[in-house]
Image (cartoon, helix red, strand yellow):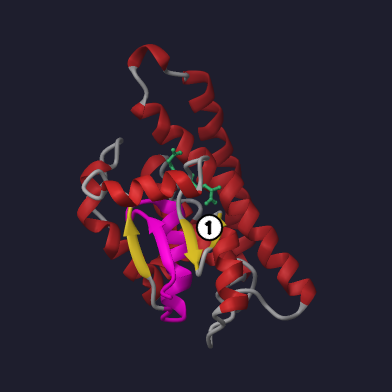
């Protein structure tokens, strides 16, 4: 039975999982979550009432959370590109950086965008200012960290880079990374040049009009 990924191509967490699929050319059935495909949405809601996507279904087993999907592919469908290193200490570094990108880049970025989708009376300017400040702090820390690394956890592309690519892609649209963070900009460019990432970004291209802050004319 084919792997089924319930996802949307413009969603950052879905792109994170998609990059892992593309890295190892793993075949799957794309169960598009959109109003045009109500059956997919109904099945998704039954499988995961929390409602966050992507989720993966493999032969009756449901895996939620983008990180866990990548972990699952790594053990159930291993390919030539290992996204989690076999060495335990190296794997800790990869998982640590995966958490850093989700918690301190992707999630604050999503709160800023979420604000733009709220009705005017329900806005939270204090929360948005906090999210922007978190992004600034994360950019400074990451810039220093990326000064002597090719990829987030060293010399090999990993789960952490799957997380970093959409996180930094959308974060720079939402709260631009200042030019002085040259190492971080260079890392973002390396990520976008990676074929698996370029493929995920291209998949989302037709939906750029959906970006609530207005997508910039680049990338
Ligand atoms: N912790 C989840 C986050 C997933 C997430 O926030 N997905 C967004 C799309 S990028 C979503 O489901 N948004 C719809 C919602 O929050 O209702 C993961 O790592 O997979």
Residue, x 56% and y 28% (percent of image)? 130
- The answer, for residue 148, to whether it is visible in the render is yes
Residue, x 79% and y 72% (percent of image)? 89
Residue, x 53% and y 33% (percent of image)? 131
On-image quarter of the C terminus: bottom left
Q: Which residue is mark 1?
A: 66
Specify whether tag 1 is near ligand 1 (CB below 8 Å).
Answer: yes
SS for tag 1? helix
Q: Is residue 46 above or below residue 151?
A: above
Q: Is residue 167 magenta?
A: no
Magenta range: 1-26
Horizontal side of 24 relative to 152 (left or right) equals left
Horizontal side of 83 relative to 112 (left or right) equals right
Residue, x 51% and y 46% (percent of image)? 48
Q: Position of residue 52 (x, y in %)?
A: 48, 45
- The answer, for residue 165, to whether it is visible in the render is no
């Amino acid at each position: 039975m084919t792997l089924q990924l319930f996802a949307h191509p413009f969603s950052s967490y879905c792109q994170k999982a998609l990059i892992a699929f593309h890295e190892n050319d793993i075949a799957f059935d794309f169960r598009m979550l959109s109003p045009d495909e109500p059956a997919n949405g109904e099945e998704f809601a039954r499988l995961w009432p929390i409602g966050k996507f992507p989720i993966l279904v493999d032969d009756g087993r449901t895996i939620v959370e983008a990180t866990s999907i990548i972990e699952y592919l790594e053990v159930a469908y291993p390919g030539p590109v290992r996204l989690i290193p076999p060495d335990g200490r190296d794997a800790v570094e990869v998982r640590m950086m995966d958490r850093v990108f989700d918690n301190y880049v992707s999630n604050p970025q999503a709160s800023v965008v979420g604000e733009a989708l709220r009705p005017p009376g329900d806005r939270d300017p204090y929360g948005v200012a906090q999210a922007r400040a978190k992004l600034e702090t994360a950019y400074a820390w990451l810039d220093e960290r990326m000064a002597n690394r090719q990829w987030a956890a060293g010399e090999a592309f990993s789960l952490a880079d799957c997380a970093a690519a959409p996180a930094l892609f959308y974060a720079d649209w939402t709260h631009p990374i200042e030019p002085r963070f040259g190492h971080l900009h260079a890392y973002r460019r390396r990520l976008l040049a990676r074929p698996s990432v370029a493929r995920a970004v291209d998949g989302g291209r037709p939906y750029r009009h959906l970006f609530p802050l207005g997508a910039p004319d680049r990338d």
